[in-house]
Structure formats: structure tokens, C-alpha cells
Amino acid sequence: MPPVMIDPLARVHPQAVLGAGVSVGAWTTIGPGVVIGDGSWIGEHVVIRGPARIGRENRIDPFCAIGERAQIKGLEDDPDSRVEIGDRNVLREYCSVNRGSPKDQGVTRIGNDNYLMTGAHVAHDCRVGNHTIFANHATLAGHVEVGDHAFLSGFCAVHQFCRVGESAFVAGGAMLWHDAPPFVIVGGDTARARGLNRVGLRRRGLSAEDLEALRRAYRTLFRSGLTRAEAQAKLDAMAPTNVYVQRLANFVRSSVRGIAR
């Protein structure tokens, strides 16, 4: 088993648990209750506070802050709230991930194979799926859900309790006040649907038939002039013919904040 490599200038609490092959850079602080999986690389000047569980083969670059308390004014620190991060994620410089709060399930969770660029922020009680990309300074408020393969462009901001669907693309500088439906590009100061995320869907390997089915569903939802209820009825009728249309229809039906149209 490869040894743990801890720089002499780092401070690792005795109650932290580091897996085989973990590397910790100079001036990094890792507190009690932190568990880091095998093969992870932690750069210089990183702060990780527990309770936090970080999986295998992650890379956390300098000046990241993980596990700081939820940014809720007047909220007392909750020792049971935590952060959970999966495997093979990359967090570039200055990323921040706050732990959960007693106002939700008490956990902020990030899945596997995500890439968070410089300055990205994941607030308390967020749920981030797998294979997502956050460009520089993409920002989530509290209680946000981000689906698999979503792309959040630079300097976009997502309001609390919003959802970003799978393979959605949030454009640079977008202000998202409502849910971003799956497979759709949204953009603007008050984000609205701009088109189907064809590039992202092709990269995922969707067939021409799947893309055509989603094109028809997109036009029904966003370009037909129908009310949301009327469009929902038509989407439900189309859903049995294609699994991706079915996911879109289910997402729209379950939206509480409304969708970005």
C-alpha cells in the first residue's frame, strides 16, 4: 500500500482518517472527523473541517475550503451537519463547499467525477450529481439540486431550492430563479430556455432518434404557446415513446418553483 504523504508544514488532526496514498500539501489544515479516501491529493493552503467524508482519487487544489458551517445568519453551529464528496472529483483553486444545516437533512453532498473550476461555490444542503462541470465562480445557493452531466457556466448563480436538471446547460452569467429543465440551455439575467443542449447530449451518446424526440418535446414545452398545464399533458402523452422525454416530463411535473421558460 502506498504511504500517506503529509508535508511537515501541514496540520492534520489525530482524529482525521487518511487512506493509502493520500498526499497533503504545506500549510493545509485537516480537522477531526474528516475521512479522505485512498489516492486523493490535497494541495497547499486547503482547509477541511469535519464532519466530512471525501472519497477516493479526488484532487483538491490550493485555497479550497470544505466543511465550513452553513452561511445562515443567526444559525448556531451544528456539530452533526456534514459534507460528503464522492470519488474522482476535481476542485480547483478557491472552491468552497459548506456543510449542511439543521434546516434540511444536515448534509451537503457531491457525487462522483465532477469538475469544479476556480472559485465555484456549493452552499449548505446542496445535492450535486455525477459528471457535472462548474466553470469559474459558478455559485449555488442553499438547498439546490444539480443533476448528472449538468454544465454550469462561469459566474452563473442558482437561487435556493432550485433544481438544475440532468444535461442542462446554464449559460455564463445567468441568474436562475426557477428550475432549469433537463437537456435544455438556459441563459439570461432572468434565465429563460434558449434551446436544446445538443452538444452535451451528443457527448453523452444520445442517438439521432433520442435527439429528435427531445426536439419535439422542447418545442411543445417552450415554443407552442401552451400553458404549462397544457404542455404537461402533451409531454405526458409523448413520454411512453422515449425515456428521455419521460424524464423531462417527470421533472416538469415535479417542479415546485416553476421552470425557466
Image: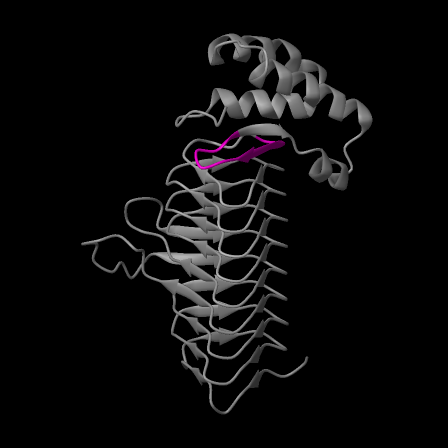
- Relative horizontal placement of residue 93, taking residue 244 as reference (left or right): left
Depth check: 59 or 86 in front?
59
160 versus 49 height, above or below: above
Residue at (38% x, 37% y) in the render:
161
127 versus 219 height, above or below: below
Residue at (44% x, 69% y) in the render:
34
Depth check: 229 or 51 in front?
229
- Relative horizontal placement of residue 89, taking residue 98 as reference (left or right): right
Q: On the image, which quarter does residue 203 sit in?
A: top right
Depth check: 82 or 116 in front?
116
Identify the residue at the far bottom of this view. 8
- Relative horizontal placement of residue 5, taking residue 17 as reference (left or right): right
Identify the residue at the far right of this view. 208
161 versus 248 height, above or below: below
Identify the residue at the far front of this view. 189
Which region of the structure is painted magenta? 182-192
Q: Quadrant of the N terminus?
A: bottom right
Q: Position of residue 90 (x, y in %)?
A: 60, 62
Q: Position of residue 44 (x, y in %)?
A: 51, 79
Q: On the image, which quarter does residue 74 sit in?
A: bottom left
Q: Position of residue 23 (x, y in %)?
A: 58, 79
Q: Is residue 185 magenta?
A: yes
